[in-house]
Amino acid sequence: MRSVDGSIDMTIIRVRSSFAGRPDRELVWPPGLSAFEALRAGGQPIGSSCSGETVCGRCTVRVLQGAKSVPGPQPDERALLDARNAEADERLACRLQTDHETSVVVLTTHYW
Ligand code: FES
């Protein structure tokens, strides 16, 4: 979303559903929240057994579009992704932040 002055102040997460019978959706990603928090606030099911503390490694999402506009993983996230043999486009939603320089990030989630 663009402000009156043309700057982007809100990112939209487009969630490509990986759940049978659930449609794709769009959720607001407010500044300062992780993707995990934004997904949960929007009612999107996402795996977790540590409630976003970057311990369980269960909240992986695939970044299908907008990866260049999100900062790369920090060492703790990288270690969990490596331990789970994550693919290159996978991130932990609880560590995924947006720089809000982009308007849309497309993710797909799974549950366990
Ligand atoms: S919610 Fe546990 S690592 Fe992200």
Image (cartoon, rainbow, N blue to C red):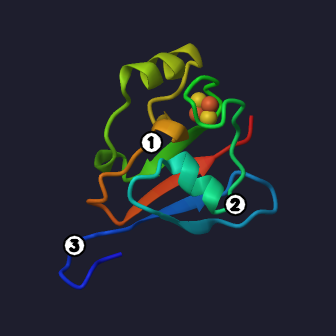
Report x, y in % for residue 85. 56, 18
Query: Dot 3, how many residues are within 10 Å of its Cα: few (below 14), some (14-19), or many (20+)?
Result: few
Q: Front-most of 1 and 19? A: 1
Residue at 27 percent across and 79 percent down: it is: 3
Q: Front-most of 66 and 27? A: 27
Q: How many marks?
A: 3
User: Which numbered circle lies on residue 27?
Assistant: none
Which mark is first along the chain, 3 or 1? Answer: 3
Q: Vertically, is 97 above or below 54?
A: below
- Picture quadrant of residue 25: bottom right
- Picture quadrant of residue 104: bottom left
Report x, y in % for residue 19. 76, 53
Residue at 59 percent across and 36 percent down: it is: 52
| SS of the residue under disc 1 | loop
Report x, y in % for residue 4. 23, 85
* Residue type for callout 3: Ser
Circles 2, 1 touching at the beta carbon (< 8 Å): no
Q: Which residue is mark 2?
A: 43
Q: Which residue is mark 3?
A: 7
* Residue type for callout 2: Gly
Which quadrant of the figure shows ligand 1? top right
* Residue type for callout 1: Leu
Q: Which residue is mark 1?
A: 96
Query: Dot 2, how many residues are within 10 Å of its Cα: few (below 14), some (14-19), or many (20+)?
Result: few
Which mark is first along the chain, 2 or 3? Answer: 3
User: Horizontally, is 80 left or right of 71 in the view?
Assistant: right
Task: Measure the alpha-carbon separation of dots 3 and 2.
Answer: 27 Å
| SS of the residue under disc 2 | loop
Residue at 72 percent across and 51 percent down: it is: 45
